[in-house]
């Protein structure tokens, strides 16, 4: 396959896969996911590769799905997403591509900087280890108006209460706070993020890939025994169910009437900066109070 929306390179015992749509903050298209899945299995099949580093070009890791490509024109005779089952089928198609990060034998490291939002969190959390810049923004604001989370490993990373706190509001956390709640393994200053990730990849390169695979897969099997993979299928069905909510219909009407950018602005403005604070009081911010008074 010729890659158009990612970069792929193998060097020093690792495959680096770089999302390469920097002008859109690496928003995911069906083509990008197809290329990503192909590259992951290529890396898994290459004996010189011990691990995969997944990263983003430009200012962000990944801002989520490219909303301008959703609901696009479909080939005649193919699923449109309009029926409930069509919707589930299309969600599961994307989920299978993301799940290659989980199912491949070799370990993966997500190198998260800038925005890691909505579908971008699906990519990061499917990786075996997430290392983030302290000032990264991690969250799923689309849960405010567009549906439920189609992949959902949050509870397995940060526990049910923080998973609910972030999913039920669409709020984000910084990389530094994500480390505190276990959503990422480690957060470091942005200027040393690449060095931190490459240092871990150096260590993986010293280990026999067969041993890496054995230890990765037994840990993943433990999560699967706790229902992790079954939950991913159910999450896709839950997202399709959530698409029938009135809020989603209102969102679609808003995009048609006012455009995507303005609709998202109106949705997110009442949430202020949109960050949840870990380990400190939040209460009612002045911004939220003023909005309610108006």
Image (cartoon, rainbow, N blue to C red):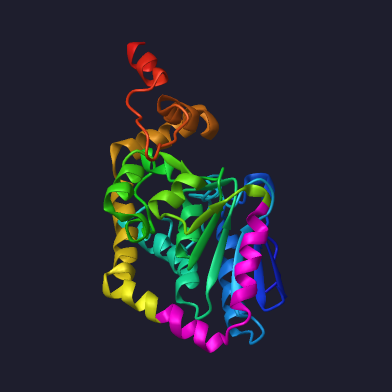
Which residue is rendered at x = 27% and y = 48% of the image?
Answer: 161
Question: Is 116 colored magenta in this rendering?
Answer: no
Is 234 positioned to the left or the right of 116 in the image?
left
Which residue is rendered at x = 68% and y = 45% of the image?
Answer: 23
Residue 256, above or below 17: above
**Residue 2 percent across, percent down from the top left:** 71, 71
Q: Can residue 113 be seen in this view?
A: yes
Which residue is rendered at x = 33% and y = 50% of the image?
Answer: 163
Segment colored magenta: 192-217
Q: How many labels does the image show?
A: 0
- Image quarter in which the N terminus is found: bottom right
The foreground one among 9 and 72 is: 9
Question: Is 193 colored magenta in this rendering?
Answer: yes
Is 231 positioned to the left or the right of 97 in the image?
left
Is 264 positioned to the left or the right of 218 in the image?
right
**Residue 165 percent across, percent down from the top left:** 31, 43
**Residue 176 percent across, percent down from the top left:** 50, 46
Q: Is residue 35 visible?
A: no
**Residue 118 percent across, percent down from the top left:** 46, 48
The foreground one among 252 and 264 is: 264
């Amino acid at each position: 396959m010729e890659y158009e929306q990612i970069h792929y390179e193998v060097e020093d015992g690792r495959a680096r896969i770089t999302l390469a749509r920097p002008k859109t903050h690496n928003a995911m298209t069906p083509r990008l996911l197809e290329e990503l899945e192909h590259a992951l299995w290529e890396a898994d099949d290459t004996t010189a590769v011990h691990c995969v580093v997944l990263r983003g070009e430009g200012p962000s890791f990944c801002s989520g799905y490219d909303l301008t490509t959703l609901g696009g024109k479909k080939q005649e005779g193919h699923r449109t997403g309009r029926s409930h089952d069509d919707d589930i089928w299309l969600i599961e198609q994307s989920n299978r591509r993301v799940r290659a990060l989980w199912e491949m034998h070799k370990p993966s490291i997500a190198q998260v900087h800038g925005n890691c939002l909505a579908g971008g969190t699906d990519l990061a959390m499917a990786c075996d280890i997430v290392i983030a810049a302290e000032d990264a923004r991690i969250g799923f604001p689309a849960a405010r108006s567009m549906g439920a989370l189609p992949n959902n490993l949050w509870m397995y990373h940060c526990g049910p209460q923080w998973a609910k706190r972030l999913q039920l509001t669409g709020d984000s956390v910084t990389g530094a706070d994500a480390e505190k709640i276990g959503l990422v393994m480690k957060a470091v200053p942005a200027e040393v993020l690449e060095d931190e990730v490459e240092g871990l990849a150096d260590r993986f390169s010293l280990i026999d890939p067969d041993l890496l695979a054995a230890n990765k897969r037994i840990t993943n099997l433990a999560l699967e025994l706790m229902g992790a993979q079954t939950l991913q299928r159910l999450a896709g069905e839950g997202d399709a169910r959530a698409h029938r909510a009135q809020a989603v219909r209102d969102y679609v009407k808003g995009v048609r009437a006012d455009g995507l950018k303005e609709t998202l602005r109106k949705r997110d403005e009442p949430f202020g900066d949109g960050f949840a604070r870990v380990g400190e009081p939040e209460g009612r911010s002045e911004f939220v109070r003023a909005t309610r008074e108006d």
